[in-house]
Image (spheres, rainbow, N blue to C red):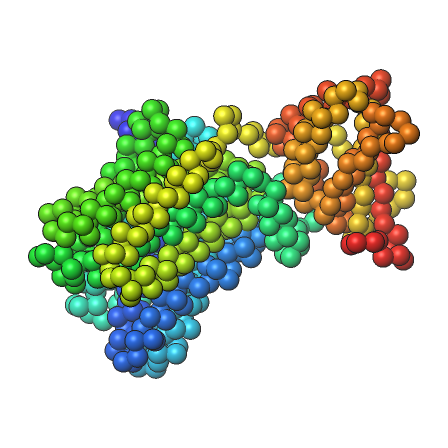
Amino acid sequence: MALPSALQPLENPAFRGLWFAWLAANLTMWMNDVAAAWLMTSLTTSPVMVALVQTASTLPVFLLGLPSGALADIVDRRRWFAFTQLWVSVIALVLAAMSVSGRLTAGWLLALTFLNGVGMAMRWPVFAAIVPTVVPRAQFPQALALNGIAMNLSRVIGPVLAGALLAAVSPAAVFVLNALLALFAFWMVVRWKGSPRASALPGKRFIGAMRVGLNYAVQAPRLKLVLLRVFLFFLQSTALLALLPLVAQGLHGGGAGFFTVMLSCLGLGAVIAALYFPRWRARYTPNQFVVAGTLVHAAAAALIVGVPEVWVALPAMVVAGMAWISVANSLTLAAQSTMPDWVRARGMSIYQMALMGGAAAGALLWGQVASFIGVNGAVLAGSVFGVLASLALRRTSIVGEVAPDFSPAPVMAAPEPAAPVDDDAGPVMVTVEYLIDPARADAFSEVMERTRRARLRQGALSWGLFHDVAQPGRCIEYFVDENWLEHQRRLERFTAFDAELREQRLAFHLGSEPPRLSRYVADGRVAPPGL
């Protein structure tokens, strides 16, 4: 029997195995957070130490987001993903052993929680980079929605399962189960036979890979807009989520225990919406998803605190969950569509940092607002903020009319140098000479502005365009690569999008011969100016 369209990616054995690995990985995250927070209350009476458990869990995402993305683009992604699960399993076993032996102190618990968070920071960018390589492009939105389902299922199941083990057995039992789940995820990843990325060049350097990743984000206008939108949305939506325990206590007929029920409703709404995504995407654009989801989430949050009744809060939480995943999924899909595979893990790690940054800033902001105007006032303020942000960005679009084609494209190989050039020799300057009609200079400049961003996204250190004052229509484009190896690597990054841009440049060239291209390597005995 054929699966519904929303579940079709699960027919792919590679994606199915990775999806179950992702579900297990997220279960370990939620279960560890619950167990660590509970255990800390028995190790110390300091509220600061209890609060630091959440900080220790999420701080690695900020510190290691880009480095982990760079590593995922450098090393074999299958092995790196498997290593992250092995890391989490070892940390869980250490926690279990120290808990059983009575040697676990508050300081050690914070340190091991931080190390467990390192595993989370390492695994998210590599998983985000793997998914587009194992599912057809047409099924990519459904695959991202299924990943959202896994996240929300784990958010519901993980805390409940951890709570049951804490009550019936001990925190050590939670850590042992975490280790087993992480080993299961490790096994599922190892079973997947991914296709290694072929390259005849030596491996990338770590610092250089991070620099190129940042350059790409800076020179990608649509990606920058997506980063802004995800930051603002999580800044808004965190008003409800961060204050949810206090909101639950303030409901008529609610209480502290009602908090987990509201979380479950949030996750249920996300799962329901994800199943309807294929039908909705046929009728609405990603921009409509983001705007409508933002406004619906704001309305649902306002309704929960405006009418503090249990019978209102539960369905409103379901609606909030549907809106939340609609926005998050649309923005994730838009971010993925703005980057080619060679920089995907680094780009998605920057996206993750923007997302987590919005959530962290929101928790701090709305917590402070709540101390002045109350919990209900802070949630309402978050809703108003979301509406105002949508109005301010109403003329922007997270996707273009046509999605860019970032599939690899053949490029003319660089001619062999007359003398051997070391990989580290550089910087390398490339010049391209064009002859154009002066009457079309403005249109040519527009194409070259897009070329500038493309060269810099590919890793160039600098770029420039000069016009010959003695010969109108003669233009020299130059750009500089870090060294000879990076120059060769930039050629490997050539995509169908770059090929189309090259054709646009060549359409302006009037010469009978192609534009003259020259390559120069800096004299290592003299420091190049400005580099």
Query: What's the residue at 37%, 57% (across, down)?
Result: 362
The quarter of the rendered structure image containing the N terminus is top left
Residue placed most toward the observer, 109 or 230? 230
Q: Residue 453's x, y, as percent?
A: 65, 38
Residue placed most toward the observer, 414 or 528? 528
Q: Residue 147's x, y, as percent?
A: 36, 43
The quarter of the rendered structure image containing the C terminus is bottom right
Query: What's the residue at 23%, 56% (across, down)?
Result: 376
Q: Residue 305's x, y, as percent?
A: 20, 52
Query: What's the residue at 57%, 32% (across, down)?
Result: 406
* Above or below: residue 265 compared with residue 61: above
Residue reaching furthest to the front: 373
Residue 291 sits in quarter? top left
Q: Residue 65 vs residue 425: left or right?
A: left
Residue placed most toward the observer, 452 or 421? 452
Q: Residue 363's x, y, as percent?
A: 35, 60
Residue 158 visible in the shown view:
no
Residue placed most toward the observer, 172 or 159? 159
Residue 528 visible in the shown view:
yes
Query: What's the residue at 31%, 28% (across, down)?
Result: 280
| Label tally | 0
